[in-house]
Image: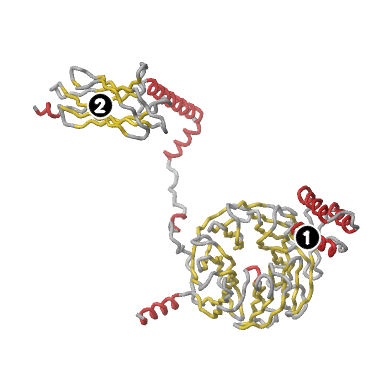
Amino acid sequence: MSSVSQELKDTSVASSKWLDAHYDPVANLYTFSSCIALSDLHGDGENKLVVGDLGTGVCNMKLKVYRGTGLLSESTLLDLPTGLVSFLMDLHEPRTPAIAVASGPFIYVYKNLRPYFKFTLPSLEVNPLEQDVWSQAKEDMIDPMTLKEMLEGLRDKSEIPLSVRSLRFLMLEPQEMENFVLLHKEQPIRRQTVITCIGTLKKNMADEDAVSCLVIGTENADVFILDPEAFTILYKMSLPSTPTLMDVTGQFDVEFRITVACRNGNIYILRRDSPKPKYCIELSSHPVGLVRMGKNVVVGCTHETLHGYTQKGKRLWTAYLPAPVTTMALMDLPTRGFQAVLVGLANCEVHMYRDKNLVSTIKTPDVVTSICFGRYGREDGTLIMTTNGGGLIVKILKRTAVFDDRDSAPGPPIAQSIRLNVPKKTKLYVDQTLRERENAVAMHRAFQMDLSRLRLAAARAYVKALESSLTPMSASLTEPLKMNAVVQGLGPSFKLTLNIQNTAACRPVMNLAISFLYDENLYSMRTAFFKVPLLVPGLNYPIDTFVECLSDKGISDIIKVFVLREGKSAPLLTAHINMPVSEGLALN
């Protein structure tokens, strides 16, 4: 058994498109795809792995740099990183990129793995009424409880949100408020936003080593484009909601598009010529991943779906996933002209999609939380993943790997989406089309006339059935009944069984009778009229009687059954029973 399993394992490794370069399950790397990048930090042609490690979420936040399989350096971060990008900020030689780490309201820029610059987001407008309230507290004109009541009123009615200081004060217990006021009343009030996502935008050239601007999204639903040298705000755009995911393409001085997924579940597309969104994509569920592939945008949603959209927001396709999406990244191999989307799933798999076609699946030992594909070291096709347990996985794409465009996922084949070769139009088809164009009004009127006549005939038949109680269910609300009849036998004796049911919810029906109307020259009945017992709701009551056929000519007729209510002349139900031919008399 061991030799067989080893052979299967060797076969699967040989058929795999990836080489397992490195796996460290205890690397203690806790990060997301937005906080991981590959960059040639020293300009020696060897890319390093730069990771913004979240640590425990409270402490041990670090900026880690890996070379090969070992840790090259690490720097302590003061707050949780929300994004990390590598960019060239000037044209000075040697051309070494800088690392920008977004954390809170700050962007920390590192060059040569050393702190270089710190950018702070501009402060927001403070509510003047809030400043006035804190001034009164500073001069001891109001007590902490009055301060709390006034701040609560401002929070509910004012259009400008309160500062962090006021919000923290409102969360305190009454015994803690006085010490908080004494500690903070001398300090000025500031209202600061934080960075939620970060990206890069080429400034004036599309070259790979061109200077890039920083693009940041803030909690205040703004998007800023920063100058790469002076770190001043070049352009500001506003969104209807807070941005969470961002993808940037183009050049700032020429034309650019910024695709932003927001917290309200929509995707907005910003362009250079407008400070507000140009297009809006409304999703059925919240986005958890956003990747641009060529001119299309691929979005992963919480409802285990993957959608493809054009730049103008038109949906092209939808792929259904076997598990929720955890992260997404772009796989770009310019040397082969190959692009695909890598989707990490919660079932310990990474799926590779080209358009809506699943072209490859990678099994992982744990749930993947971040994915990065690119040049690592001197190898172009390197896939780097971190897991939920803090592990680090490095895989290298084989040079002999070939990805088929056919979809390996279950479902309809690709041939179903190929357009049919429709034959050319015949002369008969063209003549018929011309006739329809010339007589369109007359044909439409004739159709409407026939449709109206059909509706009138159906309505008349329905009214006649209601008036004569020919329906299988009674139209009366006080006696809701249902009846069907069964004829058994070959003849000349037949057994006629009537099944009557009270369809009311809880009210019984009583004082009913059944009467039969038939041709006395053809049939005779032992009992042609009898009373029905009390009908309990929901129960089926079979009522039997026998019919004798008197004719020996092999003919049959209709027997009418009436369900009557004492004191009423109109029947509640009427049934027409088509009696079969008496085969016994016909044989004789």
> For the residues marked 1 and 2, what is the alpha-carbon distance in whole angstroms?
91 Å
Label 2 sits on a secondary structure element that is strand
Residue drawn 77% across and 54% down? Answer: 161
Q: Nearer the viewer, residue 58 or 52?
A: 58
* 126 relative position to 318: left or right: right
Judge whether 281 appears above or below 548 on screen.
below
Residue 34 location in percent, x, y? 65, 68
Q: Nearer the viewer, residue 357 or 180?
A: 180
Q: Which residue is mark 1?
A: 175
Is 582 situated left or right of 362 in this image? left
List the single residue furthest toward the right.
Answer: 139
Amino acid found under the numbered disc labelled 1: Gln
Instruction: Answer yes or no: is residue 464 visible.
Output: yes
Q: Looking at the rendering, in which quadrant would you find the C terminus?
A: top left
Q: Residues within 10 Å of mark 2 (few under 14, many from 20)?
A: few
Residue type highlighted by circle 2: Asn
> Residue 210 appears at what percent x and percent y?
72, 71
Q: Is residue 565 left or right of residue 282?
A: left
Instruction: Identify whether 121 is placed above or below 490.
Output: below
Residue 385 seen in the figure: no
Outermost residue toward the left?
588
Question: Which quadrant of the figure contains the N terminus?
Answer: bottom left
Picture disc at residue 578 = 2
Q: Position of residue 191 (x, y in %)?
A: 80, 60
In this rendering, the label closer to the viewer, 1 or 2: 1
First in sequence, mark 1 or 2: give its number. 1
